[in-house]
Image (cartoon, grey):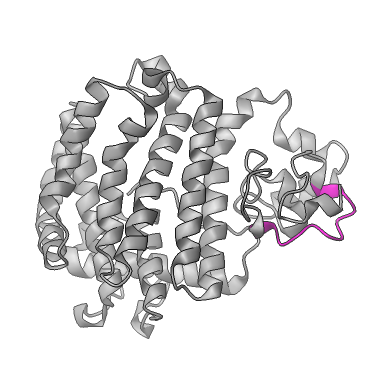
């Protein structure tokens, strides 16, 4: 997994935050029980998202033994819901795939030691995934496919295909009933994270002389952002089509928006003539105090448009309800929109700016 779907406090209720923490701890505990304590070090936010998604599709809740923050209290293996066990196994298997890539890139002894320490966990994860029908040979073949694609780069879409294939396989085999939509979601998710990774690492890769998909294919920043928007819209459409409970669908959509916005902050920042904090506190200094006391990107419903985390200016004018997480900006007396990013988008900001 890639770590995109981090939790964010923007526009979410305390109950939603509690559920996120519960699922994060639940995935960690399931990993520890099934594959050993060391395997918990591989825990990834996207695996937590996968587990949450699969549990929501089955309308299942975590047992009481998955109490958040009690790290040394592990559930019995029989208590672990099948969707959570699958997500934990997929997380460990994809960690093995990532380490294999590191070794192929000759990145040193450190990763060989990690591979040795986690070897039993990797064997256990592969065995569990085989029982679910996941074609492991095809999954692990994507590492070689990625190397081949990078050896002769053509387009950004072609370079993203091995990653997209891997995530499509993992998501699609999480539920036989919903396999087509989950495969679509996973394919788009893989393309999204691959492109975001290329965007955020572009400058560092250039300095180190490392491979970067955007540089290799001469893809401009604008073209890459359009591709990100397209893939985010595909993931959102798949979430909408899946028979999820409404609160879960809204929570996942908001989390996706927040995560993409957070990833793009480092991309868009160099093009600004002043920092986001300088811009947003220029006329509203009281907001600086508010930001210092809040977590994540420090915004609430009335701060939506100056907060890249929940309403990124790069996405405000695209089609679809991409600003749903803002919950509208009515009543903010125009303070939320001094960034000039919300003109007619679905978050309701156009009524106040």
* Count of picture labels: 0
Please state the horizontal and vertical placement of residue 317, each as a whole percent of the image: 68, 43
- What residue span does the magenta drawing correspond to? 325-336
Residue 4 seen anywhere in this rendered image of the structure: yes
Q: Main secondary structure of the magenta part?
A: loop
Q: Residue at x 56, y 27 (%)?
A: 222
Q: Is residue 328 left or right of residue 169?
A: right
Q: Residue at x 21, y 29 (%)?
A: 147
Q: Residue at x 85, y 43 (%)?
A: 285
Identify the image quadrant of residue 205.
top left
Residue 296 vertical placement versus 154 (above, below): below
Front one among 95 and 168: 168
Q: Is residue 27 left or right of residue 152?
A: right
Front one among 29 and 23: 23
Residue 156 vertical placement versus 280 (above, below): above
Please state the horizontal and vertical placement of residue 123, each as a whole percent of the image: 9, 57
Please state the horizontal and vertical placement of residue 188, each as a whole percent of the image: 40, 48
Q: Residue at x 73, y 44 (%)?
A: 306
Identify the image quadrant of residue 161.
top left
Residue 107 seen anywhere in this rendered image of the structure: no
Please state the horizontal and vertical placement of residue 237, each as a whole percent of the image: 49, 57
Identify the image quadrant of residue 23.
bottom left
In the rendered image, residue 342 lying in the magenta stretch gets the answer: no
Q: Is residue 212 left or right of residue 261?
A: left
Front one among 80 and 73: 80
């Amino acid at each position: 997994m890639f770590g995109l779907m981090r939790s964010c406090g923007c526009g979410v209720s305390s109950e939603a935050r509690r559920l996120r923490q519960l699922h994060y701890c639940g995935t960690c505990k399931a990993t520890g029980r099934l594959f050993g304590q060391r395997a918990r070090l591989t825990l990834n936010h996207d695996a937590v998202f996968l587990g949450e998604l699969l549990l929501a599709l089955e309308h299942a809740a975590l047992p009481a033994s998955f109490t958040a923050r009690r790290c040394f209290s592990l559930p019995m293996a029989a208590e672990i819901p099948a969707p959570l066990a699958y997500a934990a196994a997929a997380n460990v298997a994809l960690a093995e795939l990532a380490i294999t890539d590191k070794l192929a890139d000759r990145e040193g002894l450190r990763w060989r030691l990690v591979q040795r320490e986690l070897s039993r966990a990797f064997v256990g994860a592969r065995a569990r995934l085989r029982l679910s029908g996941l074609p492991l040979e095809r999954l692990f073949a994507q590492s070689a496919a990625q190397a081949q694609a990078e050896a002769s780069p053509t387009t950004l879409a072609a370079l993203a295909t091995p990653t997209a294939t891997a995530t499509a396989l993992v998501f699609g085999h999480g539920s036989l009933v919903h396999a087509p939509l989950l495969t679509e979601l996973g394919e788009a998710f893989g393309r999204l994270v691959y492109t975001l990774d290329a965007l955020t690492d572009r400058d560092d890769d250039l300095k180190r002389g490392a491979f970067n998909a955007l540089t290799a294919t001469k893809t401009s920043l604008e073209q890459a952002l359009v591709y990100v928007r397209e893939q985010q819209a595909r993931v959102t459409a798949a979430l909408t089509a899946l028979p999820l409970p409404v609160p879960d669908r809204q929570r996942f959509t908001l989390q996706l928006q927040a995560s993409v916005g957070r990833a793009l902050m480092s991309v868009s920042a160099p093009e600004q003539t002043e920092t986001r904090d300088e811009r947003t506190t220029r006329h509203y200094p009281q907001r600086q105090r508010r930001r210092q006391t809040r977590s994540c990107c420090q915004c609430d419903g009335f701060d939506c448009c100056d907060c890249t985390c929940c309403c990124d200016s790069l996405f405000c004018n695209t089609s679809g309800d991409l600003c749903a997480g803002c919950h509208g900006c009515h009543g903010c007396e125009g303070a939320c929109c001094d960034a000039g990013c919300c003109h007619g988008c679905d978050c309701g900001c156009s009524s106040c700016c």
